[in-house]
Every structure is written in structure tokens, then in C-alpha cells.
Amino acid sequence: MAIDSRPGPEYDDVVGFFVETLPLRGVIDRDTSFSDLIRALAPKLLNGLRHQLPYGEVITRTGHGSDPVNAFFLHHGSFSVEDADEDGIRRLYPVQDSARFDIELSTRVLDGQLIGALCLRSHLLEDGQGESTGERFGRFLTAAVSAPDTPLGRLPLLTEHEARQAVTTGEGLERHTTPALIPDMLTRQVEDHPHDTALVVDGTRLTFAELGDQVFRIAHSLIHRGIGPEHPVAVLMPRSQTQITSLLAVLCAGAVLVPIDPAHPLTRNAELLRSCASDSSSTHTPPSTSPPSSPRTRASTTSLWTVRTPSPSSPTSPTTPLTTTSAPPPSGAATPPTSSTLPDPPGSPRASSSNTARSPIWPPTSPSTCSPPPPSRWGDLGYERL
């Protein structure tokens, strides 16, 4: 901070611009009161005056010129005050009409009161910003002097109108949108913009048509295994194209999506899987004291369905990039069909599961040839609206 300072009393009557630099460093806690801040800083400031550095020497040694050393300047007693008029108003006369620094604060004691003038460089501010900055500075000081024990973080800088405007501005424009289902939105993009780029991962691009084909193939594969509403499905994959298509597929199947980050600790992921399984079934499994041995075999022992990254020893085709491992279904639900058994027709004894009965595809087809489910039936699968 540059300050206007006289080396000693013998220089009080000397005309000139005595500038020195006072190095200051401090940590201000918003919970500290203004009075505590003054009491803490006063001795440091007085002690710091012993270590003032000549302004010219600072400019020379730093090699930065006058900026940013010139950013803030404080000087005391550097403006004159005329006598009060008949209304008791006095006019202040700064030393110069133009700002020499980005922020220049001049102070003076008059009739036992500390008065000041704040001068800012106009070319650094937008229209009206200089006046509002001065008002906020004055508002802050007024509140600090009136209630010195108030924490700094609670002292007002903005008016009520400015504070309200700052909050509402962050909300953006109010938009009225029609609730839509994720499968509906994906299908609409596939139909309206089939050749537009939908996804770019590691240099690989997928159009909406290609993305929709992969997503719905996986979704149908999940539905054929009896996965649907109320079934948690954990997706354990690194960030990749397969992960994104898998996440969308779980949502399109109407299941409960449980994304698992492989980078997280094994114990954390295992606890998350156990928690999801216990919430979806009355079956209780005591927590294990040891984490799963391999990320590729992390699956719940109750009712959680887990979509995992394919094992390198048994790669899958690009159109069916997932494998599934199933556990017992929720309490009261029928046992879902295995991957080698397609669901029975609706109305049959084995079709009592809500997911099988609501499957929009019948007769069942191979996941490699099935088409997206009709949008009119997606609502029946229990998808949540956005």
C-alpha cells in the first residue's frame, strides 16, 4: 500500500509529494467484528511504519512500474475544506481533480471528526459504478461505526434492492417447459435429427440415430431380464461412451439408476450397493467388514441389479456392451427371467411381475433386432417426469 507520509515533523511545512510504501499482510475472517479487526491491526500498522520502503526504490526493484504498486493509495490531510456556508455545508477540495491511482482514499480530521474522500479511476469502471462503489464503502463504514461488534460478514454492502436483484439475476429467465420423459426426448431427437452429432467421447462421434440404437438395445436387454420400475440398477464404469449409453439405457428401462464411480474407495462403493439393496427389499444383509475383491465383481447380495464393465476375457459386441448380474428381486415380486429365458406373455403365471407385464414389447425379440418402445407406453413403465 502506498501512503503519503512525512519522514518527520520538520517536513510538515515542506511542499512536495512524499510517498512511501507500507507492506501489509493480514487474514480477515468474516466472523471477526470490526472493532476486533481495528484492535488487531492498529499495533501492526504502527509497527509497520518502521519498515516503510521508499516508493521510488520499490518501483525500481520490482520492475513493475507504478502498476500494480499504484493500485491503492492512502493519504491523510491532503485536501482543503472551505468554511461552512449559511446552511452549514462545507466544500472539499482534493489536491488534484484527476485520480493518480486506481483507488485513492483521502482523509482528514475536521472538528473532531474523521472525514474522507474516495477517488476512483473512471476508465476502469462502467457508467455509475464509481458512484455505487462510493455509496457501498460509505454504507459499510457507517454500519461498522454504528455497530462495531458486528461480524464483518454481516455488515451491509448492498441495499435491499441490490441484494434482491443479485439473487434473482442468478435465476436467469423464467422458462415454461412441458414435462417430458427422457425416452420421449431421446426418441424425438432420433426422429428429428438422426444424423446430428449427439455424443463425442475420445474422438469417437455418435449420431442421435446411433446413440438411440445402442441405448434402446441395452434397455430392451434389461427389460427382457425383468428389470423395470422399483429395480435399482448400479452402473459401475469409468467415464466413456459405454457409460453414457448405459446410464441412458437404465433410465429408458424405467429402473432406478445408481451410478457408481470406480475411482471411489471400494468400501464406499460396497456400502452404497448394500444401502440401495436394503432400501429396495425387506431382505437384510449384514455389512461386510472387507471390501469386494475386484471392481468387476461388485454386486449386491440382495435385490440389486448391477450393470458392469465387460470382462476382457469375454468381450461383447459394440451393440451389446453390457453384461448383467442379478440378485433376488424385491420382496413380493416374481423371480425375473434369466438372460437365457425370455419373459412369458402378459397374463401368464410368470408374467405377474409388474415389469414383465408392462413390457411394451411382445412377442419378445432379440436385443440385436428390437426397436425402441412406443412412446405411448413409456409412461406405463413408471418413468419420472423431469
Image: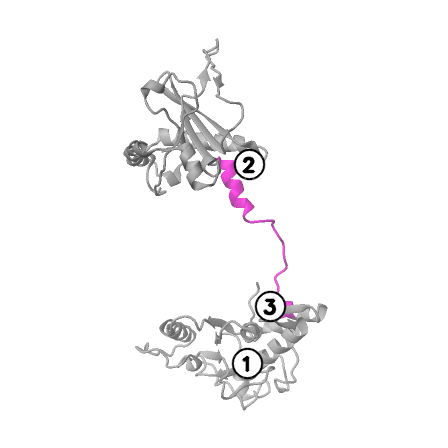
Residue to which mark 3 is pinned: 182
Q: Residue at x 34, y 33 (%)?
A: 52
**x then y, percent, for residue 228:** 53, 77
Residue hosting label 2 = 124
Where's residue 354, x and y in %? 53, 79
Residue at 45% from the left image edge and 71% from the top image edge: 261
Crowd around label 3: few <14 · some 14–19 · many ≥20 (10 Å): some
Query: From which residue to which does the magenta span run?
Result: 159-186
- Residue 219 position within the rendered picture, expressed as x and y whole percent measured from the top left: 58, 78
Which image quadrant is residue 357 in? bottom right
Q: Amino acid at mark 2?
A: Leu
Indicate which disc, 3 or 2, sits on the residue closer to the N terminus: 2
Amino acid type of the residue tagged 3 in the rendering: Ile
Q: Which residue is mark 1?
A: 222
**Residue 153 placed where, x, y %?**
39, 41
Which residue is rendered at x = 37% and y = 38% of the image? 152
Q: CA distance from mark 3 to mark 1?
A: 17 Å
